């Protein structure tokens, strides 16, 4: 029986997963590459969202439908 847990995995937990390790090895990526990328993103992202910049969910009406018009 499969059980679901409400707790998110840490990056270290994910990097320790055998399937993730196989995929990273296949792609030529190391755990240190992932840690370095996360560190760079953390350092370069803004600390706060600008108050005049609404969040994405504020832009999209809940019942908006996508449409396509052929030329």
Image (cartoon, rainbow, N blue to C red):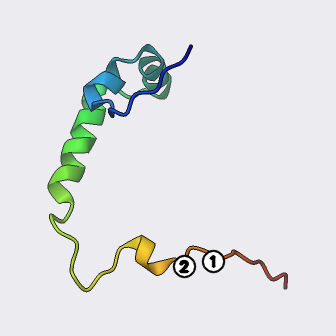
Q: In the image, what residue occupies the spot 56% across and 13% down?
A: 1
Q: Residue 45 vs residue 15: left or right?
A: left
- Residue 63 x, y percent position in the rendering: 62, 75
- Which disc number belongs to residue 64? 1
- Marks 2/1: CA distance? 5 Å
Q: Is residue 44 above or below residue 60?
A: above
- Residue 25 x, y percent position in the rendering: 44, 20
- Residue 4 x, y percent position in the rendering: 46, 26
Q: In the image, what residue occupies the spot 30% across and 34% down?
A: 34
Element type where label 2 sits in the image: loop
**Which residue bears the numbered disc 2?**
61
Q: In the image, what residue occupies the spot 25% across and 43% down?
A: 38
Q: In the image, what residue occupies the spot 20% across and 48% down?
A: 40
How many residues crowd around disc 2 within 10 Å: few (fewer than 14), some, or many (20 or more)?
Answer: few
- Give the farthest residue toward the right: 71
- Residue 56 x, y percent position in the rendering: 42, 72
Question: Along the line of sight, which residue is nearer the eye, 54 or 23?
Answer: 54
Tag 2 near tag 1, CB within 8 Å: yes
């Amino acid at each position: 029986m499969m059980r679901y847990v409400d707790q998110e995995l840490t990056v270290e937990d994910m990097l320790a997963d055998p399937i993730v390790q196989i995929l990273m090895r296949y792609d030529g990526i190391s755990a240190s590459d992932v840690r370095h990328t996360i560190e760079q993103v953390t350092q370069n992202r803004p600390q706060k969202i600008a108050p005049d910049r609404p969040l994405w969910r504020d832009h999209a009406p809940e019942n908006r439908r996508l449409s396509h018009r052929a030329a």
